[in-house]
Image (spheres, helix red, strand yellow):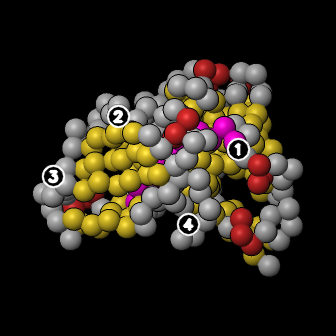
Amino acid sequence: QSPLTQPPSVSGAPGQRVTISCTGSSSNIGAGYDVHWYQHLPGTAPKVLIYGNNNRPSGVPDRFSGSKSGTSASLAITGLQADDEADYYCQSYDYRLDGSQVFGGGTKLTVL
Amino acid sequence: QVQMVQSGAEVKKLGASVKVSCKASGYTFNNFDINWVRQAPGQGLEWMGWMNPKSGNKVYAERFKGRVTMTRNTSISTAYMELNNVRLEDTAVYYCARGRAYGRGGRWFDPWGQGTLVTVSS
């Protein structure tokens, strides 16, 4: 079981806004460690969407944004598009796991 | 452009070893660590460990300690991940990813290799 908890699925209609939560604890997000987000389409390599809680690498549309507060983080996607349908993962560092990077369990986004 | 290219699919018997390679290009190999992440069928991403190509220092996730070995050949900018005594539950797609250090102890992963399917059979 991952130290970071994500909802298994979210959905939204084209054009809508959806958010994906990532809930951690005092040994990871709550300890001040940063959160990064990835998009993963089946059969392809995962792609970073957000690094350092709220930074977008070049080439990532500003429809994607991240935030962090307390022991949780969120990924928001606005103007939902059909090709946003994918799995999304949060990732952080956990000091109780011997220097480990940890991933959330992943959230399947369905565009209705 | 920065690219990570992995070796091809592998089929292994229970108890065997598997070694996956990851060739980096488009950047200075020694300047960024290499991480390994796997995804079993129907499961999420699981971090396995990282290695500093310059120093050779490694950090392995607890559940893989004793079974995984990460190495590199700096002359050809290639990293390797070897998993020993494979089990049926090791059937997964294995990814390498360049690690970008961020904040205290953290790193984010970009780019990722295309993935290598390892199938373990009885």
The boundaries of the magenta stretch are A87-96
Identify which residue is drawn at 63% across, 35% down.
Answer: B34
Q: Which mark is residue A79?
A: 3
Q: From the image, state whether disc 2 or disc 3 is nearer to you.
A: 2
Q: For residue A62, what is the image quadrant?
A: top left
Q: Quadrant of the N terminus of chain A?
A: bottom right
Identify which residue is drawn at 59% across, 47% down.
Answer: A102
Tell me the distance, in whole angstroms, between the alpha carbons under discs 3 and 1. 37 Å
Q: Which mark is residue A54?
A: 2
Q: Nearer the viewer, residue A71 or B113?
A: A71
Q: Is residue A37 left or right of residue B99?
A: left
Specify the amino acid type for callout 3.
Gly
Q: Is residue B62 above or below residue B13?
A: above
Q: Position of residue A55 (x, y in %)?
A: 35, 31
Helix, strand or loop status at disc 1: helix
Q: Is residue B58 left or right of residue A83?
A: right
Tell me the distance, in whole angstroms, between the alpha carbons under discs 2 and 4. 26 Å
Q: Nearer the viewer, residue A76 or A28?
A: A28
Q: Nearer the viewer, residue B90 or A13?
A: A13
**Do callouts 3 and 1 mark residues in contact (Cβ within 8 Å)?**
no
Specify the amino acid type for callout 2.
Asn
Residue annotated with mark 4: B43
Q: Residue furthest bottom?
A: B122
Q: Are marks 2 and 4 on the same chain?
A: no
Q: Is residue B103 visible?
A: yes
**Do callouts 3 and 4 mark residues in contact (Cβ within 8 Å)?**
no
